[in-house]
Amino acid sequence: MTGVVVIGGGQAGLATGFYLQRSGLVPDKDFVILDAAAEPGGAWARMWPTLRTFSPTQYSSLPGWMMPPWTGDSGYPLAAHVVDYLTRYEQRYGLAVRRSVAVRSVIRGHRGLLEVHTGRGDWLAEHVVSATGTWTRPFVPAYPGSFAGRQLHTADYRHASDFAGQRVLIVGGGNSAAQILAEVSQVAGTIWVTLRPPRFLPDDVDGRVLFELATRRYRARRLGGPDTGGVAGLGDIVMVDSVRAARDRNVLRARGPFARLVEHGVRWRDGSESSVDTIIWCTGFRPALGHLTSLGLRGPDGRMRTDGTQAIQEPRLHLIGYGDWTGPASATLIGAGRTARDLVTKL
């Protein structure tokens, strides 16, 4: 038996491990971190190599140890820099993450404990922290019709050069879509499709401002005040260097949704068609919570009710890293750390 089982060894799981250790618990004895991946880095290790953080290193750090400065160029850190940081963070604090351990299910056990079942043994825990993120659950909306060309999701994207000379349709109005559009448009013809007109943040707004806005909204709601709208009230797309360059090239022009897929492209609502070779769906992710299905915590709307990070119907369970739903900006590096602090204090 162990006191706490943390499921997920990415940024949220590591931040939780840091605060558990600081509270006096011993890694791999009083708590254990289980991660399905073979290597450190969480979702950052699976992202495309040219992806950048939205903030400088001092605003992209986990608790206890600031991310080393990025000196590669004048921009914000690339994904590989974050992976290196998370790898060294894990080693620095001796968090003893158990890797290649995929959690299959969490169920209620005897003596008030939770049972965590994996393909490599089972654990009994007084508390479980789910920090599996969203990267393994890419979402693609349903459209009528069928398309004979290549389709991929943000999670599958790696290099713009893979699409050189093609006609590429990019679907989505968020940061991933804008960054991928900025890259692919340099080597291919592109069409950008968004559900609503894209909303660009001012050039001087980055992750620092976004986190503070999210924090203010969370505190206001907790105190029963009016919903400030948080980040959503300001815009959706951070103007990193590549996106600003795309704007200068007049690439950031979006069309509204198409009506259906056709064999060689899409048909628009006015009946016209566009032929494309590839569709890249930058349409987001859903929380990876399949391991919690057996607990029966989802409501009629499919959502799990929480009080902060704590599951209301199963108080031995906490969730972190799934967005504002489980703590303000908890899916970001700095937000994960602050949410983990509150989580461990409550736990």
Image: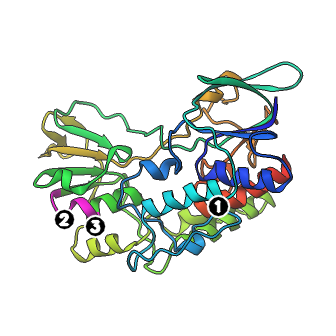
Q: Which residues are the magenta region?
A: 182-189
- Give the image's coloring scheme: rainbow
Q: Earlier in the sequence, mark 1 or mark 2?
A: 2
Q: Residue at x 86, y 52 (%)?
A: 24
Identify the residue under disc 1. Answer: 335
At label 2, which amino acid type do we have? Gln
Identify the residue under disc 2. Answer: 186
- How crowded pointer 2 is (Cα within 10 Å; few <14, some 14-19, many 20+) is rated as some
* Residue that protrudes farthest toward the top in the picture: 110
- How crowded pointer 1 is (Cα within 10 Å; few <14, some 14-19, many 20+) is rated as many
Image spot of residue 246 (x, y percent):
27, 71
Pick the residue in front: 152 or 39: 39
At label 1, which amino acid type do we have? Gly
**Numbered mark located on residue 252 in the image:** 3
At label 3, which amino acid type do we have? Leu
Image spot of residue 43 (x, y percent):
49, 48
